[in-house]
Image (spheres, rainbow, N blue to C red):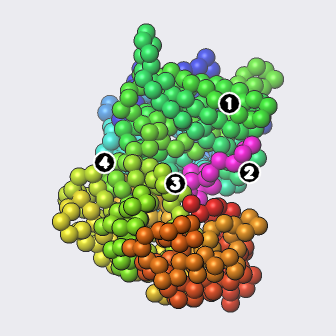
Amino acid sequence: MMLDPTRTVRPRAARRQAPVGARAAMEVVEPRLLFAAAQFNVTTTADAGPGSLRQAILDANAAPNDPIEGPDLIRFSLGTGVHTITPLSPLPTITDSVDLDGSTDDGVTPSVELNGSSAGAGANGLVLASSDPVFASFVTGLIINRFSGNGVRITGAGNGLGINYIGTNAAGTAAGPGNGANGVLIESNGNFVTDNTIAFNAGAGIAVANTSSGNDLSINYIFKNTGLGIDLGINGRTPNDVGDADTGANDLQNFPVITAADPATAPATGMNVTVTVNSTPNTTLDISFYSSPTAEGQGQNFLDHTEIVTDGSGNKTFTYNLTGASPTDVFTTTATRVFTGDDGNQFSINTSEFSDPFPNVVQPGGPSEVYVNSSAWTTAFKAFLESKGLGDDVYGYKVFANGAATAGPASNPENILPWINANQIVLKYATAPTGGGIPTVGSLTFTSAKSQTYTATSVTQVAGDPTAYVVTLSKPLGGGNPTAGTAPTTSENGDRITVAVTGSTVSVPLKVLQGDTDHTGEAGTHSVLAADFSAVKKKFFKSTADVPAGNDTDYSPFHDVNGSGDILANDFSEVKKRFFQDMAGVPTAAASLSLSGITSDLFGSKNIL
């Protein structure tokens, strides 16, 4: 995707940018009517020396800015076409206010490429450390790629990026070499990043450090980054909180939630997208709409934006018509807080992360269904799962289906695994994968909330089914001593494990509980008490092949604590290990960790099916 040379920076009467102190609203790419203290021209693509970009930055840093005359200018006189500068070491940090413009004469197409392949380990493309209460540095017209660090790192306040290609090739298209970390890393307040194409970076598109706020990140073209499109706190997905009272990076502004997307009824065209927003009461928010061809959860194409005001409870639900949208699009949104200054100018700050994509479909090449299984489960046990709509007699227990990349099937929307000994994951594809789409030992990654290490030891095709592959794990899900990192043959601890499949958007969270067998949540705590013994005892010597004879003997897989397919004495032992353990409790001693309950930060109080 390449920037449209005819479009304006923002479809508004005036560009709104994040204020630092008494910042005035300014147009991003309008002709700059600034009386510069000095201008430095880049006349060569050489790494250093007179006329180089390196020397221009050094000279601009050394030239003091006059508060009336404005920032120094860095301009490029390299001729027509795209010109590549290949730094042989990191470029100097920009410490003084500088207006750096590498765009073509039309002012909207980047024409200077910074190729960081020779800049050294950890090198960032540019570092902006300038700060100013009115206008710090502004960078436009650059193509920044191949740096092993971040494309741009911002440590000063009041800086801006506009109309840059960060991570793409020189054309700004979908074939970029990327940067080794984030496209843009922000570690300060009051900056704005808008109208940039940010793609193919190894980290997030835009990452905001937890101590930074007031940053306007709306209206960019962000896609195909390995991390999130926008990552507030640099810690992965940040869930919304009721009332938006939490604080952190960009005040952890809640993202909107898309609940529907339907074709518009004639004479209207495009798509009607319904959005629900929860934030602070009586707050003006700018909601930006994006589309992408897949559900990667970023925003490849900016479509439109609109302002809404939350009610006294902080809520707002509305439907907005996107005239240029298609039923094949996958939609995302962001929310940016808006306020009006004493002079009537609008300011925007604290852009949220991207919303969950809608519809949440699986990226081509990824599995369409995911199951957990065990080498110890009997055929009868798996047949029981199938009879209850919980899985399949070949693949096991279903935890992911119908393209819902963050939720399980209707029978188990929270992907909770209330038993143990699940040591296999089955990936089921809509069509048989080929070439690089075939899963391998190295194509799965596992993240454990209890810092356990899970690895795939083998990946084999299911006999007779070229669309399904069995991944055998190094130990059962939820297994291992959190202190010693051991790998017992059965799980003695719950865990929350995220399974990511390389080459697709599939990321499956698995919540493995430990021993609250009757799952009634005694006193709301999910404690393991005598009632759990009774729940197991009622099923003693029952198996999945038995015919139910009333509630007391109705077999449930959640009473087969060790997942063997039969209710036997070892199930008693597994429950007994957890006697008086509280599944919402926090471990108090290292010695008790191996039998500790699930902490409230993992699951809270959840009834189990």
Foreground pick, 370 / 212: 370
Amino acid beneath label 4: Pro
Tell me the magenta residue range.
231-244
The mark that comes first in sequence, 1 or 2, is: 2
Q: Residue 364 carries which label?
A: 4
Q: Distance between the residues labelled 4 and 2?
A: 37 Å
**Image coordinates for residue 52, horizontal then vertical, percent:** 44, 46
- Secondary structure of residue under mark 1: strand
- Secondary structure of residue under mark 2: loop
Foreground pick, 576 / 120: 576
- Quadrant holding the C terminus: bottom right
Q: Is residue 499 left or right of residue 243?
A: left
3 or 4: mark nearer the eye: 3
Q: Residue 413 carries which label?
A: 3
1 or 3: mark nearer the eye: 3
- Residue bearing mark 2: 247
**Image coordinates for residue 607, horizontal then vertical, percent:** 63, 61
**Image coordinates for residue 420, horizontal then vertical, percent:** 49, 77
Residue sitting at x 18%, y 65%: 464
Magenta stretch: dominant secondary structure = loop
- Secondary structure of residue under mark 4: loop
2 or 3: mark nearer the eye: 3
The mark that comes first in sequence, 4 or 1, is: 1
Residue sitting at x 59%, y 57%: 234
